């Protein structure tokens, strides 16, 4: 009977293990860009506050990632500018951070950092503070910590979150660092974020869609809107994905990504006077003005943002661009909500449940055998 008890405890332990989230493995996003303009970029990080910080506010998230402005956090998540810092943080929240390519891989630099508190371990910092976006091994390597179990209270750690700046199929994208929720599928993630299954599998070096794991850190490419920004402009590398907006030109211009034309839609930021922000015009037309031709009636001309310069004086540029909407090619970008709704069951989840059922079946059979006369 004692043997049966031990076996039962073993089975229960296996069941608990099979139902617990998979340990997050280290993610290295390929980042082979080496040109001065291409080796750095702005990437997006998906952050879901752990259960212990589920009530975290936008101000708390901003402080954790050392974001420079509340407005930038709102822009990355397509939230109204009237949203106060005390508002609860949506789950997950998109964090825009600088990314640096080095040695064939990309990682965030400058931010975030973390100051060690009493009782902290590197594993706790990785899992409980930064929600599995990074592993304790990554933190130890980035900070030359030889013994991950020994960190000093007050020590400042650099947190190297995985990211990338590489184009995908020759097209610039915004790379989105995404922690896979339980019950997700590659097809569901691709549909939600306007990517393709093939691109996600290739970027993450996955053999097939069945190898997706809950808790896995994925590189998801987000398509950005086309723009008329000049190659000589300071913000020439500006890429804005759908369901977000961004401030540029010293906050004088706000640009969003159109969900129907894939064209960058930029306007002068309200509330900033002309004494600081130069007026952007195309002749008599102000930035963002649109006119529709009469022949053919489907052509529109827009005064489009063309970037800003500051070589001799601060200047905001604009150009007239013409777009035909008669036979628009392609499809509208899929909406990218602030939280994941990827559907489908991961193969790993199905395997764990089948393992639990098999284990219980063996246990029941042994119970019947022992109780038999």
Image (cartoon, helix red, strand yellow):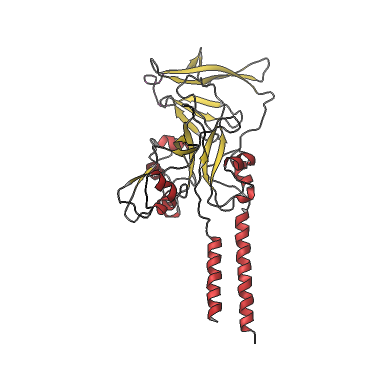
**Foreground: 31 or 66?**
31
Magenta segment main secondary structure: loop
Find the residue positioned furthest to the top: 283
The number of numbered badges drawn on the structure is 0
Magenta span of residues? 270-278
Quarter of the rendering occupied by the N terminus: bottom right
- Inspect this view and state whether residue 82 appears: no
Is residue 276 shown in magenta? yes
Residue drawn at (40%, 48%), measured in percent from left and top? 140
> Is residue 94 placed above or below 233 in the rendered structure?
below
**x and y, in percent, of residue 328 in the image:** 67, 26
- Inspect this view and state whether residue 357 appears: yes
Kindly indicate the quadrant of the structure image that contains residue 295: top right
- 208 horizontally vs 278: left or right: right
**x and y, in percent, of residue 249 in the image:** 43, 24
**Foreground: 69 or 124?**
124
> Is residue 112 placed above or below 275 in the rendered structure?
below
**x and y, in percent, of residue 332 in the image:** 63, 33
Residue drawn at (61%, 43%), measured in percent from left and top? 201
**Foreground: 18 or 272?**
18
Quarter of the rendering occupied by the C terminus: bottom right
**x and y, in percent, of residue 13 in the image:** 52, 67
Find the residue positioned furthest to the bottom: 373
Is residue 21 shown in magenta? no
């Amino acid at each position: 009977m004692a043997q049966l008890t031990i076996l039962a405890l073993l089975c229960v332990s296996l069941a608990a293990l099979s139902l617990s989230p998979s340990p997050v493995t280290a993610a290295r996003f390929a980042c082979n860009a080496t040109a001065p303009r291409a080796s750095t970029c702005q990437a997006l990080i998906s952050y879901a506050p752990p259960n212990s910080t589920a009530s975290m506010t936008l101000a708390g998230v901003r402080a954790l990632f050392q974001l420079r402005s509340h407005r930038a956090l709102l822009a990355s998540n397509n939230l109204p500018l009237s949203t106060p810092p005390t508002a609860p943080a949506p789950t997950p929240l998109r964090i825009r951070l600088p990314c640096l390519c080095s040695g064939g891989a990309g990682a965030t630099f400058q931010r975030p950092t973390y100051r060690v508190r009493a009782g902290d371990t590197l594993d706790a910092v990785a899992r409980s503070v930064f929600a599995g976006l990074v592993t304790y091994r990554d933190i130890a390597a980035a900070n030359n910590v030889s013994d991950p179990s020994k960190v000093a209270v007050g020590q400042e750690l650099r947190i190297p979150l995985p990211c990338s700046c590489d184009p995908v199929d020759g097209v610039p994208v915004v790379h989105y660092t995404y922690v896979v929720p339980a019950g997700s599928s590659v097809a569901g993630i691709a549909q939600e974020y306007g990517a393709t299954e093939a691109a996600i599998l290739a970027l993450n070096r996955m053999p097939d869609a069945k190898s997706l794991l809950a808790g896995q850190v994925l590189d998801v490419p987000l398509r950005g809107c086309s723009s008329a920004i000049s190659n000589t402009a300071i913000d020439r590398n500006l890429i804005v994905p759908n369901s977000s907006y961004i401030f540029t030109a010293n906050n004088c211009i706000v640009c969003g990504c159109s969900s129907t034309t894939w064209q960058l839609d930029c306007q002068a930021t309200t509330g900033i006077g002309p004494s600081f922000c130069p007026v952007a015009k195309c002749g008599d037309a102000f930035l963002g003005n649109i006119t529709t031709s009469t022949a053919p009636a489907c052509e529109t001309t827009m005064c489009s943002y063309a970037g800003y310069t500051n070589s001799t004086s601060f200047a905001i540029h604009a150009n007239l661009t013409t777009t035909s909407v008669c036979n628009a090619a392609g499809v509208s970008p899929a909406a990218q909500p602030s939280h994941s709704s990827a559907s489908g069951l991961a193969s790993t989840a199905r395997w764990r449940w089948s393992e639990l059922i098999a284990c219980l079946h063996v246990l029941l059979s042994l119970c019947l055998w022992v109780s038999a006369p």
